[in-house]
Image: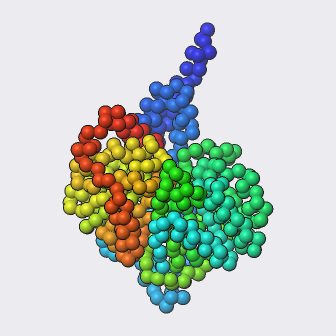
Amino acid sequence: MPTLFQLALAINYSAAIWMVFAVLRRRGEPGAMLAWIFALLTLPGLGPFLYVVFGETRVYRKASRLRRRRLDLINRVKRWAERQFDTSAAELIGGLPPELQAIDRLGRDLLHAPPVGGNYVEFLGESDKTFAAIENAIASASRHIHMQYYIWQPDQTGYQFRELLIQKARAGIECRLLLDSVGSLRLNRRFTAPMIEAGVQVAFFLPLWHRRRRISLHLRNHRKVTVIDGRDALMGSLNIGDEYRGRLRSLSPWYDSNIRIRGPATLFLQQTFLEDWTFATREYLDPDRYLVGPTREGESIIQILPTGPDQPTPVLTHVLAAAVAAAKSSIRIAMAYFVPDPGIMLALEHAAIRGVLVQIILPTRTDAAATLWAGRSYYPELLHAGVEIYEFDAGMLHSKMVTIDDKWCMLGSANMDARSFRLNFELTALVYDPSMTQSVSAMIEHHRARARRISLFEVHNRPIVHQWIEGVARMMSPLL
């Protein structure tokens, strides 16, 4: 008779073998596939458990419905352009400059997200200014407020913005708040009850326990956006909490990057919120009510890219690789988490080799140590190619900023890692505005000037223990 241990071991390896075949059938990244197979066969009990919780890498939505809605939005903007702006639709729903045509096509073909002109955009490089701008935007709302955040903390900042929403809801303004169920795990009913009683609609994206959906601890909605009346929007890397004001001693000061947009591009942010709200709540919000006619607010061209695991291809990887390939003189990157995939690594190395100035500023202090060590393991290849790498130790660098040739930039919620490229729902804005881009470049340069440049000598002479840690972190990077 087999013992209980032998029976449990047999069940474990039967499940593990079945899961190995599932890994092979999905044909993911080779590194991730090998990591999962290694874990399944060498970690009895734990390996299969981790695969059940973290193995799913796709969220399935009705793609045809999303495509129809986005195409309908594009047609709406075209009609409004011809009717209200006394201009051709081609001028408003226009293309990016010739050197950016590849990026233009990627957004159009993969996401049905064209660049749109006629926008005012403002760069907000300081958290206090961003919080003040969100507060002022909420105060100005006359019809509805849509807020979507990965983290909302039950602290002084969280309570402050909760009270703002409660006041607006009591004044008759429609208020909707969509939060990620893992990022905002600290929120409880005691915190949300006053909002709900006041009329604020609160929903959580992909709850951990849902009878209709498989648990997906790692497939998270990382987007951060506030849309006011469908006309005024703020988006970027800032969550709602005291740490983002630099009030936590260990990670202070805290640096984020955000933008404020007015104009036709806000409609694409609104559309993204409507899609996410419908997915999370199964409540359909009528576009005729919330997608208002746009107004020309400026001359900036903006392309909004909502990416995530509901798409069959890693769109963000394609866009970033195309952006690096389009660079002629400079690429400046300030990034909270940096674990590039092979395609991005090759693009950055190639850019440096062909004479483009490539500067990457990364934090030394971080709230994700494994990602920090994994990122450091890529330093030797990049440095050998001529990439300049700097580590910033004057606070927590949580920004996600990329500028190309000081002419256009990418900002949003996405980091340069597997999680943002493949697992998270992210929101990125491509902004073709040389004036604003120079402000972003100036902020990156400000961080670089206070950072320490990493040398090849330093990398090759790291303590052997650090090299081992970096190797293990890199091996596990597909799962981070």
278 left or right of 433 in image: right
Residue 435, above or below 428: below
The type of colouring in the image is rainbow
Relative to the observer, which residue lies in front, 122 or 159? 159
Q: Measuring from the top left, give residue 112's x and y in whole percent.
A: 48, 67
Task: Name which quarter of the figure residue 139 lies in.
Answer: bottom right
Task: Name which quarter of the figure residue 457 lies in.
Answer: top left
Relative to the observer, which residue lies in front, 471 or 81? 471
Relative to the observer, which residue lies in front, 133 or 209? 133
Give the residue drawn at x 73%, y 66%: 166
Q: Measuring from the top left, give residue 57's x and y in whole percent.
A: 51, 46
Q: Measuring from the top left, give residue 398's x and y in whole percent.
A: 46, 56
Residue 394, above or below 44: below
Give the residue drawn at x 48%, y 70%: 124
Give the residue drawn at x 46%, y 49%: 366
Q: Residue furthest top?
A: 1
Q: Measuring from the top left, give residue 388's x and y in whole percent.
A: 27, 55
Q: Residue furthest left?
A: 354
Relative to the observer, which residue lies in front, 211 or 131? 131
Please say whether residue 205 is visible from this viewpoint: no
Residue 422, above or below 295: above
Q: Residue furthest bottom?
A: 86
